Image (cartoon, rainbow, N blue to C red):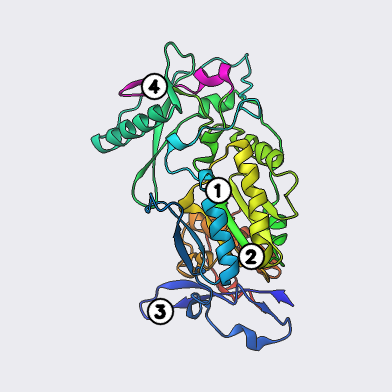
Amino acid sequence: MARRANLSIFKDKAGMETLNIFEVDREVQEDNPENFKLDPRDKMSREKEEPTKSIILDETEPDRTVKIGARLTEQVKKDVMNLLKEYRGIFAWCHEDMPGIDRSVISHNLAVNEKCKPVVQKRRSFNPERSAAIKEEVSKLLAAGSIIEVKYPEWVANVVLVKKKNNQWRMCIDFTDLNKACPKDSFPLPRIDQLVDAIAGHETLSFMDAYSGYNQIKMHKPDEEKTAFTTDQGLYCYTVMPFGLKNAGATYQRLVNKMFARQIRRNMEVYVDDMLTKSVTADRHAYDLRETFDVLVKYGMKLNPAKCVFGVPFERFLGYQVHQRGIEVNPEKIQALARMVSPKTLKDVQKLTGCLASLSRFIAKSTDRCLPFFKALKKGKGIEWNEVAKKPSGP
């Protein structure tokens, strides 16, 4: 058995060419051509989001809910619900709910090279909409104690606003200059392919996400002022580890590896701030969750209730659809490829190869089949979307 994909070009009546992807997410017999007839877009809803139900953690605050699997047996559902209510303190509903990880456990040290000259970035201007978004976010961070005012900082960076999926603004800081002065922390992150493979064979899963995960780790005190940034309201620096700092991911992984050392590979998997508790059988899940929750309480880490789901047989995790049978490709990745038109520019080919790279483990002989695309990326050559490139990459 092997996972296979068939890639081909379809031209509609208007002459528009579209890239079609066939049978990306199925295990098929190597020698059975009948398996390559269906367009996956006819069955993309084959395995949708697992049905869940919201439960109220505290009757005095009915708006505070979390999601649990709707298909759990009554006894398992009761056990998980009671456990979540017992440990409702592990959830954060706003920044003020996060005390943060104690500095005696971990803090983020920049280790700035003293030979590097500090940089004060030239201040950027923003339109009224963006300025209002910055002001609002600064107020929230000040109230939570995540930032403080600073005077005479040697390093000063600018704010960068990024549009989120919900059309709201995410405030980030341009730490480009500061990051150049910091050495690389080579602490290893888990290999995603090995991590998701380790989930296979587990009947019940719970997916957890830390609330503003990076912000739960505090900055090394002497390094706080180096994170200074400028706004219309003044100069501020972070007391917590902000997103965008070099080595922030390594620092976070070091923390969770320490926290969940006794559970990782046994009944838990962790990739930075994405956490998963797994149970071979559903009736053990409440026990495994309790072990996880006890660790969260011990270290003071808080979860984001809006991004957690408990007691489900499958869910999307690190870009894959994971469940007891193993892993499948994320349907959204198939849809993204199915909507693509034939590449016209070098950037289009780069986008195509990037999408295919994320699906490579599901495409037999993916390197051979994508060879025409890689050849098109060679420097000094123009884009030639010829018959070889258009040829279906399946057998």
What residue is pinned by disc 3?
Answer: 12
Comparing labels 1 and 4, the label whose residue is closer to the camera: 1
Q: How many marks?
A: 4
In the picture provided, is 130 more to the left or to the right than 195? left
Q: Nearer the viewer, mark 3 or mark 2?
A: 2
Dot 4: element: loop
Image quarter of residue 25 = bottom right
Which sits in the foreground, 103 or 17? 103
Which residue is the site of mark 1?
Answer: 87
Q: Is residue 191 above or below residue 106?
A: below
x and y, in percent, of residue 71 in the image: 54, 72
Query: Which three-letter amino acid code belongs to the residue tagged 4?
Result: Lys
* Mark nearer the viewer, 2 or 4: 2
Q: Magenta part of the protein: which range?
A: 220-234
The x and y percentages for residue 348 are: 49, 58
Crowd class of label 1 (few under 14; some 14 to 19; many from 20; radius 10 Å):
some
Q: Is residue 28 visible?
A: yes
Q: Which residue is mark 2?
A: 204
Q: Is label 1 in a helix, a strand or a loop?
A: loop
Instruction: Name the residue at the bottom extreme.
Output: 34
